[in-house]
Amino acid sequence: MRAKYHILASIAALTAAIAAGPASAHSADAGEDVVRSKSASSAPEAISKAASEPSTDTGWSFKPRGRFLFDIANVTAPAAITNNGLGFSSEARRIRLGASGRIPGGFGYKIEADFAGGDVQLTDAFLSYKSGGLKITAGQHNNFQSLEELTSSNATSFVERAAFTDAFGFERRVGLSAQYNIGALMLQSGVFTANIEDLGSGGDNSISLDARAVFAPQIGGAQAHFGASYHWRDLDDAVTSTRYRQRPLVHSADIRFINTGSIASVKSETSYGLEAAIITGRFHAAAETHWLKANRTGFADPTFFGGTIEAGIYLTDDQRKYKDGAFKGVRVKNPVGKGGFGALQFIVRYDRLDLNDAGIAGGRQNGYIASLIWAPVDNIRFLVNYGKLSYAGAVILAGTAGDYDADVFAGRFQISF
């Protein structure tokens, strides 16, 4: 725990020095060493001091960022299945802290670390440059996978994203990318390596090319979204096998009913996806499909499929937000504390994942999921989810059968800033 505070205080001291401008930035390394030599109790003071200096007249700025997501869940399956992943579970899904801001000349920065799970992991860590409709980003960031993946966990419809996003390995990676906006059209492309934690000597030396195009016109009073993405990834000659699998809706349940197991001789992956969404008044709908082809040497190449379709409505006078090719958090019109009830949203989803092809039998999942979300004020949400997951050819057998249903209940409390 003391180590976590030291790291957090170091981040705060560094970003505070950045916010103070070039004169202070020069001494950031020395300041970091001082923070590390202090006791753990000095971390909150360092963070408070940094947050109290949001900007300067030099054009530098500093904005503290954070999110805390706490989950509970219960997974039930046929009595013939005995597995420690079933039953009740809970976890701190994300405890993320960091900062972002502007630097003179059109530059910007963002750095965040996640402290959940007992480890400290960098999530975003990048420098950006923006001029007109062009934005260039270098460092660890998302690589344009899909609408579902690029929507922040602060604004997702369910406690976890669609099944294909985890099964196909969507994650932030270190790379260089460009985004160009012209009217309702947005183009994104980049070259990426691996996640920052997997780099280094003997680590993941994969490289990928990723591209996404989004057309987001206003149609009458509605916001529409149409997108397509393409991805190619060389897994590196050192990789001899890979696998694709997924949990039953919730992250805290350490069980995978569908799982390809290790697939030998996968040298690269080719994948592409399609997206569509609309927001009109209190209603929204979204749909996505994604195909991933595992390119093997000396074997048939399996293509796996994932897709989801959802529809939701606010039961209060609120509306889902959208910007830059992703859904954003709600701005509550009638918050608690000001005579209102907050924002209440109901969403249903069908979620499919198929891991069977070319001799690979990982199983199929059809998920029927409902979500009720209450936001009493901006940046606070309570989520309750229920999912009926129907499996065909599951790798965990119920006696002699691989076809059966599992029921999942999940709840989440979250706060973000």
Image: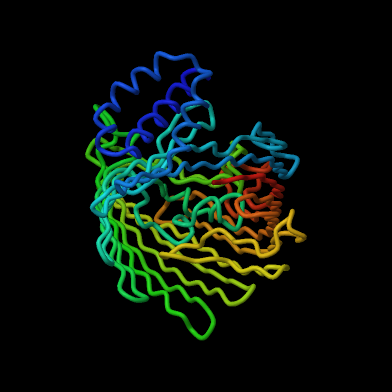
Q: Residue at x 54, y 53 (%)?
A: 161
Colour scheme in the image?
A: rainbow
Q: Is residue 107 above or below residue 287?
A: above
154 relative position to 105: left or right: right
Which residue extends farthest bottom?
220
Nearest to the observer: residue 352 or residue 415: 415
Q: Is residue 82 visible?
A: yes
Q: Is residue 298 visible?
A: no
The quarter of the picture where residue 254 lies is top right
The quarter of the picture where residue 283 lies is bottom right
- Residue 235 position within the rendered picture, expressed as x and y whole percent measured from the top left: 28, 44
Q: Residue at x 68, y 51 (%)?
A: 383
308 relative position to 389: left or right: left
The quarter of the picture where residue 397 lies is top right
Which residue extends farthest front?
57
Q: Is residue 292 above or below residue 244?
A: below
Q: Residue at x 55, y 51 (%)?
A: 154
- Residue 377 position within the rendered picture, expressed as x and y whole percent measured from the top left: 67, 54
Nearest to the observer: residue 31 or residue 271: 31
Q: Is residue 410 above or below residue 200?
A: below
